[in-house]
Every structure is written in C-alpha cells, then in structure tokens.
C-alpha cells in the first residue's frame, strides 16, 4: 500500500526525520490560510499516489496567501496520471543548497534491504546514470548504524558536519522502514539546508502482507480509499453529502436529470457520528456553489444529522444548502433545520430541484 506524501512525512517526523513545516489542505481557501501561517515562500504539492508530479505541474511555488490560493486552484483542477487531485500539501519552501537521493527498498534477488544513495536528487532514480548510484546492503532488523551512513556519505562526496548528519539520517530512515514493514522508503530529493538535511519529498510503501499490523495506517485516512468517509471530486458546482454509496449515486443521477452537476461527493457510510459529518460539510463547502445533503436515517437519526449540519454549516454559512431527511426522527430533524433557517425537505427529488434552482439550473435536463 502506498501512503500519500503527507502521511509518509507525518511518520518520518514522528520518528525523528526532519521534514518541512506544512499542512495538508483541501481547498484554495485553506491553502491561502496555510500560506499565511507559514509566511514567506511556500511549495504547493498535489497529494496523489503517482510519481513525477513535479513534471506534471503538481508541485509549484508561490508567495503569500493570494498567489497560493490561485496556484492551489490550478493544481486541484489537474489530473495527474489519470488521478484527480483531492488534497494539497502546503509547505515552507526550503532554501536548498544541494539535492540528494536516498532510499531503502528490498532487493528481491538478494532478499535483503538495500540502501540506494546519490549526490543528485529530484529526478526519478530509474533515469540516474548507474555510476552515480551508491548501493549498500543493510540489516534493518538489527538496526543500521550511523557509521554505515557516514561511510556512504563519504563515498557520495559529502564533507564535514554533513557526514554525521547523513549517518543519523540514514539510521533513522532504516528505523522507519523496519517499524512500518515498508517495501520502500524514499526521499527524493533530500535537501541540504545549511549544515542540515531535510526530507523535501517522501514516499513510503507498506508491505500489504503486513498491513494487519498497522491498523492506524489503513483506518480513517481522510482522503484515502481505505475506510472512513470517501471523497470524490467530479467537476460541477453542487457538493453532495450522502450516506451510503448507493444513495450517493442515486443523488448524482437525480441531480443530473434536473440539469445540475455535482462538484464532488462524500459518502459517509452508515452510522457516521456528528463530529465526522460536520467535518465533511466543512470540507465540501470549499469545492462548490451549493450543497445537497441527502440522508436516509436508519441507524443514524435525523435529528443528529440536523445538528451536525447546523454545526458544519458554520464553516460555509453563505453557501446555499438544501437538506433531505427521511427516516428515524425525521420530523424532529426537519424542525431543527427549518428553525435554523436551512431548507429542509423529505424527498430527494424536491431537494435536488431546490438546489439546482439555487445554482441557476433550469430545473430540467439540457439537450
Ligand atoms: P515529485 O516530482 O513528485 O518527485 O515531487 P517533489 O516533491 O520531489 O518535488 C519536485 C521538485 O521540486 C524537487 O525535486 C525539488 O527540486 C523541488 N522542491 C520541492 N520542494 C522543495 C523545497 O522545499 N525547496 C526547494 N528549493 N525545492 C523544492
Ligand atoms: Mn520527488
């Protein structure tokens, strides 16, 4: 299983590998806010599970909130190797003096972990000239010693305080590799900032056969494909929040038949709590001109949904919103919403009609 760069960096940082300051965001507005907090120049990076993002336009620099928002919008609209961009990592831009390459992977032939390093970074390792790559077999199970890293660093031509720095860095990367049952831990580029080394990029692939040992990596990935609410971007202007994949698909169909187009949807799954639901509404607000919430309350009670919607709407109070509630405690839910000034109805058709009207749709399919 491949982890997103931001997930890999979280793990790196926890283990003691320096990474740039930054945070993951889902909308241009959030990106701008992050840039404001970081100050100075920032790097905005598409979070997709594909290499070569840089070349595809998925890694760009900006300065200040305004430019960051514009760049973020451009990257979120990209498709990189067929993958939509759902999230961005906004980081401080490091004044890099040198770029290196460092990875640990399993050498299938030798059946052992191997470290690859090069005094150049940035490009894909496959394109490196063979004589530029240094290789060293290691025993990650017993731990890699800093001196092994110092030797490798010397072979790469590093000097002075960079030798112990690289030694410590490599030993820590080996720890990350071992603790997480990784197949690949790659830093490309590893950048030199003064006398320090920082992981400007991060890749961490976990051995699928060992995933049962890492429930934290597979559960609740905010934007991942495993577990938790799933988020899908579509390109129209109406955000859809529904519970259950079938319900989400039905909602998209009804919208389409009425001339509306969904910008994205979140499928909450069954029995989602108030906390998760209000967070989802906040996320969707950044991607749309209007929002349609379509919930059938079975285990989830409609009054709970109503409270979550009212709370979540604070993240995007000006956004036109229509809620359809049906099922357990429906009357109470509809009452709460209407009292809070939210359009609330009990059928999907009616809700879709109202939300399409809000975005200027004609209420019938265009031909
Ligand atoms: P990739 O194309 O998917 O491997 O994306 P990377 O995260 O490696 O970024 C592409 C390139 O952008 C890197 O090779 C660097 O040259 C550059 N880059 C990324 N982050 C930084 C940074 O913080 N500072 C500087 N100076 N360059 C960066
Ligand atoms: Mn890279």
Image: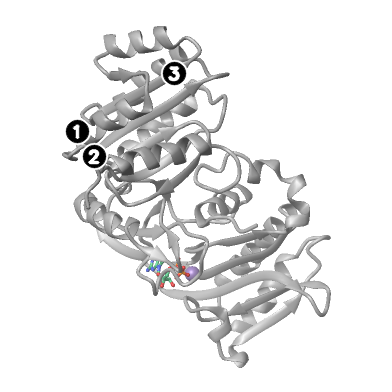
Pick whichever of labels 2 and 1 is earlier in the sequence: 2
Contact (CB < 8 A) between labels 2 and 1? yes
User: Which of 285 and 122 lies nearest the eye of the viewer?
Assistant: 285
- The residue located at (37%, 23%) in the rendering is 347
Q: Earlier in the sequence, mark 1 or mark 3?
A: 3
Rendered location of residue 326, percent (x, y): 44, 18
Tag in front: 2 or 3? 3
Camera-near label (2 vs 1) is: 1
Classed neighbour count for the residue bearing mark 1: other residues with Cα under 10 Å, few (<14), some (14–19), many (≥20):
some
Instruction: Report how far apart the C-alphas of labels 1 and 3 lie in the structure.
Output: 22 Å
Q: Is mark 1 within 8 Å of ligand 1?
A: no
The image position of residue 199, as x and y in percent, is 51, 62
Q: Is residue 38 visible?
A: yes
How are the residues colored? Answer: one colour
Q: Which residue is mark 1?
A: 358
- Looking at the picture, how far across and down is residue 325, in whole percent? 41, 20
Instruction: Give me the disc on residue 220.
Output: none
- Please give the residue where the numbered disc 2 appears in the rendered image: 289
Secondary structure of the residue carrying numbered label 1? helix
* Occupied quadrant, residue 258: top left
Which label was assigned to residue 326?
3
């Amino acid at each position: 299983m491949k982890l997103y760069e931001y997930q890999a960096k979280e793990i790196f940082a926890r283990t003691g590998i320096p990474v740039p300051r930054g945070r993951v965001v889902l909308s241009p507005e959030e990106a701008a806010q992050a840039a404001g907090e970081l100050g100075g120049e920032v790097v905005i990076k598409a979070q997709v599970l594909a290499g070569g993002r840089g070349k595809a336009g998925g890694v760009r620099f900006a300065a200040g909130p305004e430019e960051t928002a514009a760049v973020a919008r451009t990257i979120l609209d990209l498709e990189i190797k067929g993958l939509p961009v759902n999230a961005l990592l906004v980081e401080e831009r490091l004044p890099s003096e040198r770029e290196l390459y460092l990875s640990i992977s399993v050498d299938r032939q030798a059946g052992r972990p191997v470290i690859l390093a090069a005094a150049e970074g940035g490009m894909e390792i496959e394109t490196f000239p063979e004589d530029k790559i240094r290789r060293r077999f290691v025993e990650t199970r017993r731990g890699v010693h800093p001196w092994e890293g110092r030797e490798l660093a010397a072979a790469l031509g590093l000097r002075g305080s960079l030798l112990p720095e690289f030694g410590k860095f490599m030993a820590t990367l080996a720890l990350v590799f071992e603790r997480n049952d990784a197949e690949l831990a790659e830093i490309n580029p590893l950048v030199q900032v003064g006398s320090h080394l920082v992981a400007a990029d991060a890749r961490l692939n976990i051995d699928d056969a060992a995933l049962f040992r890492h429930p934290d990596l597979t559960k609740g990935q905010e934007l991942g494909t495993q577990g938790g609410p799933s988020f899908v971007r579509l390109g129209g202007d109406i955000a859809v929040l529904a519970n259950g994949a079938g319900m989400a698909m039905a909602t998209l169909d009804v919208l389409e038949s009425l001339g509306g187009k969904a910008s994205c949807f979140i499928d909450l799954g069954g029995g989602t709590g108030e906390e998760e639901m209000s967070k989802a509404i906040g996320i969707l607000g950044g991607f749309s001109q209007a929002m349609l919430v379509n919930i059938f309350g079975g285990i989830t009670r409609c009054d709970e949904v109503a409270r979550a919607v009212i709370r979540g709407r604070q993240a995007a109070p000006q956004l036109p919103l229509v809620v359809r509630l049906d099922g357990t405690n429906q009357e109470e839910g509809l009452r709460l919403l209407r009292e809070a000034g939210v359009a609330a109805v009990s059928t999907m058709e009616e809700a879709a009609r109202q939300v399409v009207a809000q975005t200027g749709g004609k209420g019938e399919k265009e031909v």
